[in-house]
Structures are given as C-alpha cells and as structure tokens.
Amino acid sequence: MNNCLRLLIVCSFVVGFAVNAEIKGLIQVSAINGDEQLSWQQGGVGLYRYDTDHDGIIFSQGLVEFRHDLTTAWSAHGVINAYQDPESTLGFSQAYIKYQPLTQSRFKWHLRVGGFYPLMSLENPDMGWISPYNYTNSAINSWIGEELKTFGLEATLKLPGRSFKSPHSFSFIGATFKGNDPAGTLLSWRGWAMHDRQTLFNEGIRFAPIASLSTPQLQFQANQVLPFTEVDGRFGYYAGIHWDYLKKSQFRFYYYDNNGDPAAINYKTGQYAWDTSFSSAAWLYKLTGQTRIIAQVMSGKTAMGKNRGIDNRFYSHFIMLSHKMAKHRFSLRYDYFEVTDIDGWQLDPNASQGEGITATWRYQLTSNWQFGIEGAAMDSQADNRAAIGFKSKFSQQQISLHAQFRF
Amino acid sequence: MIKFSFAFILIFVVLNSHASTITIYDQDQQPLQNAVVWLTPLEKQQKVEPSETPFIMMQKDRQFIPHILVVPQDAKVEFPNADSIMHHVYSFSKTKTFELKLYREQPQTSVVFEQTGVVELGCNIHDWMLSFIVVVDSPFYAITNEQGQVSLNIEQGKYTLNLWHEGFTDFSQVESEAIQLSSDEYSYQLKQHVKPIIAIDVDEFDDYE
C-alpha cells in the first residue's frame, strides 16, 4: 500500500472518530549528533536509532492518540504514528476496543480486544506509549516497542484499594493472542538496542546482513523481521499482576509466552516462528512527590528451528532516577543487557552484551511546548559482528536536542 | 415587602445567634479532623430554602475537589472538569444514584440532591478517585479542622448533633445524639471507631493501568 493511500485511510478514520472523541497528539523535532556506527535501521550494527549519516534535524516523533466513547462501557482507542526514519511512514501502533462496565461490585473488570501493548512497563506512561523521562528508551522497552504487540484479547480484574478501604490495589491480567511469532529475531541477530522507534502494524524492521543468513541452514530467513505476523497458527498468552501501594509504590510482574512453534516457517515472507517466553518485573517508587525510581528486569529465552538450532537466553535490567523541579525534569538511567547463546550451531553465534548510561533534561516551557537535551553512551559487544567486517566490541555516543509540541 | 421580611428575619437570627465551637474527639480522645458536623434544632425546626447558587464538586489533577462537600437538602451541585482529560462521575449510593457520562469541562446538567444522607462518588476511568457529598437538613453545618473543631453561628438550645466521617465502617450511617447547647463550647466523643483515611497522591502518569 503506498503512503498516500495509507494517509487517506488514516485521515478518514480520524475524522470519522473526531466527533465526540478525545484526541491529543505530539510532534517532536530533534537535532541529532549521532554515532559513526551505522544504525541497524540502515542495515548497520549500531544500537542507537541515529548515526552520523543522519546528523541534523529529524522529525523524530509524530503521533495522534484518540479515544472515542461509544457508550459508557465501550470505547475505541488508537494511536497513529508518523516517522521519517528509516523511511517516511504512517500507520497505527495501537488500535483496540475496550469494554469497561460500570459496576456496583467492589471488583472492577475490563476487556481489551485489538492491537495493543501489554502494560508490563512503567517507563512509558505518556501518550502513545512514549516515555516522559528519557527520550531514548531502556533496552527492555526499546525491544517491547519494536517486537512485542498483542493482537488478541486481554482481560483485567481489579481490586481497587478504595473499594476495600485498603492502601493496596491489585490487578490480575490474562491475555491470549495471535501473531507476534517472530518476536526474538532482533535479540538473536542484532541484540538489544536503545531507541524510541516503535514498530507500526504491518511494518518490518531491518537488521545487518549477518553472515549466517547466507548459510543453507538459514537461507529462507529474510534480512528483516515482521514481528507481529502469524507463522505457526498457535495462540500465545501472557499473565500479569499489578500491585499498587497508594500509587507511591507500583509493581508489575508479567509472564509472556508467544507459544511459538520453532519448526514453523513462512517461506513467502521469510519469517520463522520463534518460541519466545520471558518474565518481566517492573517497579516504580516515589521517594518524594518530585523524585522517583523506576526499575525493570526481564529474563527469557527464544529458540528457532526444527531442532532448536538457534537457542538463546536473554536478560536485561535498568534503573532510572527521575527528579522533577518546577518546570524541569532530570532523568538518569543505567541499562545492562545480554544475550547468551546456548545452542551448538557454530555457524550462527548470537551472544552479545552491553551497558549504557542515558541522561536527559527536559524543560516544560508551556503546556504545549517542551524542550530537552539528552546525552547517551553505550558499550556493546556481539559475536556475530566480526564475520561481516565490524569490530566485535565498540562504544557509541549520541547527543540530541528535542522540541516537542503537544496538542 | 418580602425582601423587607427576609431582611428582618436575617437580622433577628444574627442578633440571637453567636459562634459556638464544637470539638469532636475520637475514641482515643484525639481531636478528629474532617468530620462532618451538623445540628438540627429539636424545636422550631424550619425548612431550609435551597440556595440558587450551585455548589461545586470539581475534578482537578485526577482528584475530586473538595474531597468532602456538605450541602443542604435540595441543593444543586455542578461537576466542572478542570483536567485536560475526560472524567466520569457515578454514585450507587441510596441517597442519590446517578451517572454523568464521560465529559470534558462542564457536564450538560447539574445534579439536585433531594434526600439527606451520604453520597459516595467515583469515576469509572480513574478508580482511585473518591469523594463524598453529605446532604443535610440544616443550615448549621461544617467540617472539623485539624483541632477537631467547627464554629457555628447558632442559638443556644436543644439540637440533634449529627456526625459523619469517611472512616466509619458503614459510609451510609450517621452518628446522632440529642444535645443541649448552653455555652459557647461543646465537645463530643465518637461512639464508634474511625479507620484512618487512605490518601492517594497521584500525578499525570499514574493512570497508565
């Protein structure tokens, strides 16, 4: 579908919903001083979104988030994003229907059906699943934003503290979904990365033309991942729990399993189903009204091939300190990430690891305008870089200025 | 003539009333803050005419403000939304069951509270939002301060002292006792236990759930 037709469909959809809808949006323009390592988006092995080829001004975020209430209980939600990199694109990153009945019971519940993110993280509560803290997301949430999406049904049962006269609130979440079979591809062949580029429905993500894709064993794999596609016909699932104490402490634990059949492959699109499962624990704690700590840990495994020829473990954690002072917000984050290769395939080494520091200052000039600056540095190493002529280990830095307009 | 009579009654009431301080203590003899106190005369009770000016229960920063609103019977209450997001208001309380569907700025209608009692308010979108409207059949009402005190311009005499606190085990129940107000100060100790109030402090990122 060409971009003009896509734009026309999206605009018609927005206009159709504009009546009685809550619509908000954001445009972000950034000035980038990127690293010399070419970004994975351009087919390189760099782990930041930008590189020196893209130094200058870039349209880094454009999004419209809407909510349309059909009745008291039924509402339609969506997020439309526009990006300039790696090529101009426009489309949905979320679109779902929510059913949240008004009930006299002390227990509350709701359903979501459509395409959406599991709410396992506490770093991305801003509109359109962006972060109000750092511009560059943690490694964990960069990966969720690019390779994880639920196309299915999610049910939530809530025990709000106010209903039980308790300072503790709990939510129990269960979901089943189709698609998302190739999730794990990027972790294996590129490794973790740090960025704020979310993948739109039906979008593909490039990565470097690693040597193993030229072997007979991996000849059917495309040099891109279509992360949300269905390959094996099986349902995946996840379950989670949220525990809030007076909103001062917020804890979330999720177990996710795409239930992928590692033997399944779609020869036409060049996509395997990866058997990917992981646990994620996220915690937010407000030290004061102005200062908070956010931390998250993710640990999981992913495998592909009839005999699980590719079999990897992946792990990452981050800890962030964010302080708000009048119109200023300072956020400092440390990330650690690694992929461990446990299979016997010498032809396809997948081990990688790294760590990074990201420091951000944001200034809220008015309710519409926000400006910010960010510096980020990362060391990383990956076993599959040498075979395609790159250093196995390198450091990267990225400095960026940002102007955001919200409406 | 009506205006003249009204002014005369007002002057009469003002001249015959003076500030009485009532202090409320909990069962541990500690002053109780945020208790709703109202007195209904046991003698010469008059129907209170509802005010034309509506009372305001606002939604701001994802909370209801005020947390407790006391209004006389038949009062009209408006629910303006000062947030940039939409809110919803509902009550399942027997005193007044109603729903204001999701709206921004100002809902289409105000709500009249015809019956006395306690109305618990919530928002279906933000389930931590909680507030109370206490509807009373008296013009003599107030909410206790940090010292557990209210000051009412009221004549000395016989009254029913009515009390309500959100820490009561049953929200819908009011504690009442007949009293003789014969001096400027009066103190009262609650007969029931009051649970501590749960105050949830939220910010703009807390509705990601």
Image: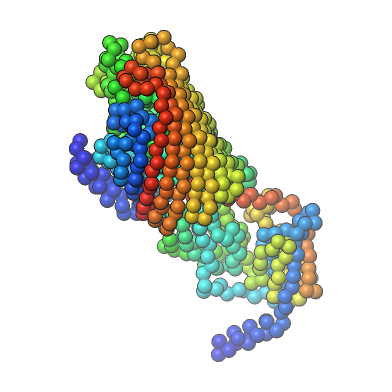
User: Could you tell me if residue A172 is visible in this image?
Assistant: no
Q: Residue at x 36, y 21 (%)?
A: A385
Task: Where is residue A396? Give x, y as percent.
Answer: 40, 32
The quadrant holding residue A201 is top left
In the image, taking residue B27 as reference, residue A170 lies left or right, namely: left
The quadrant holding residue A44 is top left
Q: Residue at x 63, y 44 (%)?
A: A166
Task: Where is residue B119? Give x, y as percent.
Answer: 58, 57
**How many numbered discs?**
0
Q: Is residue A280 above or below residue B97?
A: above
The quarter of the rendered structure image containing the C terminus of chain A is bottom left
Task: Where is residue A354? Give x, y as percent.
Answer: 46, 27
The quarter of the rendered structure image containing the N terminus of chain A is top left
In the image, taking residue B199 as reference, residue B188 lies left or right, namely: right
**A267 or B39: nearer the viewer:** A267
User: Could you tell me if residue A401 is visible in this image?
Assistant: yes
* Structure colour scheme: rainbow
**B127 or A231: nearer the viewer:** A231
**A213 or A110: nearer the viewer:** A213
Q: Is residue A88 above or below residue B102?
A: above
Q: Residue at x 50, y 35 (%)?
A: A334
In the image, taking residue B67 as reference, residue B100 lies left or right, namely: left
Task: Where is residue A308? Give x, y as percent.
Answer: 39, 12
**B150 or B8: nearer the viewer:** B150
